[in-house]
Amino acid sequence: MKILVGIKRVVDANVSVRVKPDGTGVDLANAKMAMNPFCEIAVEEAIRLKEAGHAEEIIAVSIGPEAAQEQIRTALALGADRGILVTTEDEVQPLAVARTLKAIIEKEQIDLAILGKQSIDSDNNQVGQMLAALCNFPQGTFACKAVIQDEKIEVSREIDGGEQTVLLTLPAILTTDLRLNEPRYASLPNIMKARKKPIDMLTAADLGIDITSNIKTLSINPPPERTEGVRVDSVDELVDKLKNEAKVI
């Protein structure tokens, strides 16, 4: 079985994001970049499936600038076998990502694609579902448990009412939730070995697709600063302010 794992390069979760003074985007100058945390869970799950003898090869795929090789190298150090980077300097929308992954799935004859359920920068939660629709594959989203059974995968999904278990026939799409696993750390020997693992550099044209975005970001604004709290002397005063000033009741 061949597994594709989606990797996204994002600003490190511990970094305070700043908006550019002109409001045209997020200021990434000198910002520490990292692999999207949900993608880390996807990589870990793929490695566990390989360690259990269910997979022969794990391919880490990313779409973005050449600097995204760093995040692919991280996946290779964790246990992925090779990487593919589709290079672009443009902002890529979820549908374009799904189209790109579909082309790679067809090219590489992938049996299982594992993606993070969402990225911490855009929070769209769309790529996995779009990819399943484009490929006409069954999907198990928000997975908190996944077990391979013959040519099928049993997936427990986190839903509003608890958990739902579905049985998917491979090939399939899986998107990961937080409770699926705890990602490991890369050891120093594996980091050194990852430097020799191959990363194929492709473009959208190489795959015969167009990833030009039809959406243009007009402006980005930081959230308003919180105002100083007000102390009230009674419950009646609190209710009055919530009703007449805040207008939330």
Image: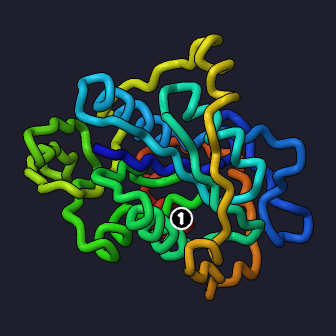
In percent of width and height, residue 184 lies at 47, 20
Q: Residue at x 57, y 19 (%)?
A: 186
Colour scheme employed for the rendering of this structure: rainbow
Q: Is residue 53 above or below residue 90?
A: above
Horizontal arrangement in the rendering, residue 76 relative to residue 147 (left or right): right
- Using residue 2 as the reference point, say whether residue 20 is left or right of it: right
Residue type at tag 1 = Ala
Query: Dot 1 surroundings within 10 Å: few (below 14), some, or many (20 or more)?
Result: few
At a point 23% along the width and 66% down the height, the residue shown is 137
Q: Decide which of 105, 164 is in the foreground and name it.
A: 105
Q: Is residue 195 left or right of residue 36?
A: right
* Residue at left offset 65%, top offset 48%: 10
Q: Is residue 101 above or below residue 33?
A: below
User: In x, y percent, where is residue 38?
Assistant: 46, 42
Q: Which quarter of the figure is the C terminus placed in?
A: bottom left
Q: Is residue 222 visible?
A: yes
Picture quarter containing residue 148? top left
Nearer the observer, 213 or 72: 72
